[in-house]
Image (cartoon, grey):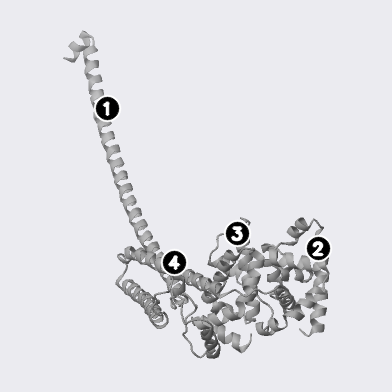
Amino acid sequence: MSNLETNLLSAVAKKNAKALEKIYDLYSPLLFTIIKRVLNDENLSIKVLSEVFAILWLKADTLINSKSSLYLILVNLARNKALDTKKRNEKLISEPYDDAYENNYILPQIFCNEELNIEFLQSEQETIQLLFSNLTEAQLYVLNISYFEGKTLEELSKTLKLPQDTIFDKIKVAFSNLKENLIIAGF
Amino acid sequence: MTKEEAKQIIELAALGCLDKTQYKSFIETISNNEELKDEFGKYQKMVSLIPLSLKIEAPNDEIKNKVAFGIKKIIQTKSKEVENTLKKIETLEKKPSEINTPQNVEETTENYSAQKNIYENSQIEQKNLIDENLKPPQESDTEEQTYQTAFSEKDETIDSSEKQLNRNKSPEVKMMIDYSPNLKEEVADEVTKRIKKTFNYQLEDFESKFNKKIKTIKILLTLIIILLITFAGFNSYLMYIMYSDKSNNVEIKNEMVRPPNQLKDSL
């Protein structure tokens, strides 16, 4: 986590609302895009975005201990929260939403210690989009549907009417190509 | 799950394609292996770039206001929940305190005072923050505008230049997030302590009541045994009387049945 991000998150942990606003200004476009892509509903997305920032406000001291980049924390937090809301609306999750559930399934467990700066990544967005466009249509489709719809391999197999092994291979090849392209692009 | 199995499904785990059980088992396996953790971290980084392949849509000011309003509501609800829990515990504590020893009563009172102080401080800080940040609504302000231009300004050290830029864009209408700073971990800890304490008191109360009941039962059993013994004694006494009466009667009958000759002799 960069110094600025650490300072911001520490300030949020100390209940500094101005720091929360700063994080909102930096991250809300990306987080809102993720949430809206998952839920496909603007009003619900606004509600979920509020919930994401409320979690950040209330659990900043827990999140700061993970020592991972704020970018990774927030992107994963927003995705987890949006997918959970979607599945609850579809009545696919019956477990009650309480503090323990939130800690186990909504707060992300990040193992990446690399610094990812939102401003840098946004400035490089075109390059990143180009890297993704180098993947085949099928690979891109599988990555998108699994990431934004949170489907398991079994569910993907049912949805796409393809054997699980085929989908698994597609994901592996997609990651392999992406990894190569990212190294070439210097990420 | 073995390390090899975990390595096989590392991409699926990073992409979120595992069910909860599989994912939990996967995390347990990799958490003891630095190499797998690093590998998984790299995949997490790649996956986190997927959203950047989308066209980013910046939420407008209206959405910002709604989000700020939403955050405020959520935090208020959470604060109320904590407040209600405190009240419930307070009610629960009243009864057990009656059976406490003087030392325990002191402890409870201290605990309660500390808890009360934390809560009162949070209320004061919350009020200060409102005074500090919330400007009185203008005549033209709607309810939503009152909550506009979110997130109070507590620390001026953070980014004053951007603040200036924002000022140029929109009129100066401020919104604060209504929160209770101390109603978080300290309160949660206190709540846990108090729940434990209350539970212990209730347990003690239950134990003393249980012991009293056992004593009463013992006394009752002793009384019943004494009654039974007395009854048995009385019965045997009655039997004895009846038996002796019967033997007397037999003797009288025998005398009455004696033939006259024998009666004469006997006379």
Image mark for residue B243: 1
Respond whether the residues carrying marks 2 and 4 are from the same subunit.
no
- Mark 1 belongs to which subunit? B
Side of B63 where B80 appears, left or right: left
In the displayed image of the protein, which residue is found farthest to the front? B140
The chain letter for the residue carrying disc 2 is A
Q: How packed is label 3: few (under 14 Cα within 10 Å), some, or many (20 or more)?
A: some
Secondary structure under tag 2 reads helix
- Which residue type carries mark 4? Glu
* Label 3 element class: helix
Q: Residue A77: x percent and y percent?
A: 62, 72
Measured along the vertical axis of the image, is residue A155 above or below residue A130? above
Q: Residue at x 32, y 65 (%)?
A: B94
Q: Which residue is mark 3?
A: A88
In contact (CB < 8 Å): disc 1 and disc 4? no
Tag nearer the camera, 1 or 3: 3
Disc 3 and disc 4 on one polypeptide chain:
no
Q: Measuring from the top left, give residue B71's x and y in whole percent.
A: 50, 72
The chain identifier of the residue carrying mark 4 reads B
- Provide the chain ID for the residue under circle 3: A
Q: Is residue B255 above or below residue B21?
A: above
Q: Which residue is mark 4?
A: B81
Percent position (x, y) of residue A22?
56, 82
Q: Quadrant of the N terminus of chain B?
A: bottom right
Q: Earlier in the sequence, mark 3 or mark 2?
A: 3
* Alpha carbon distance from label 1 to label 3: 88 Å
Q: In the image shown, does B156 or A88 lie closer to the viewer?
A: B156
Residue at image mark 2: A167
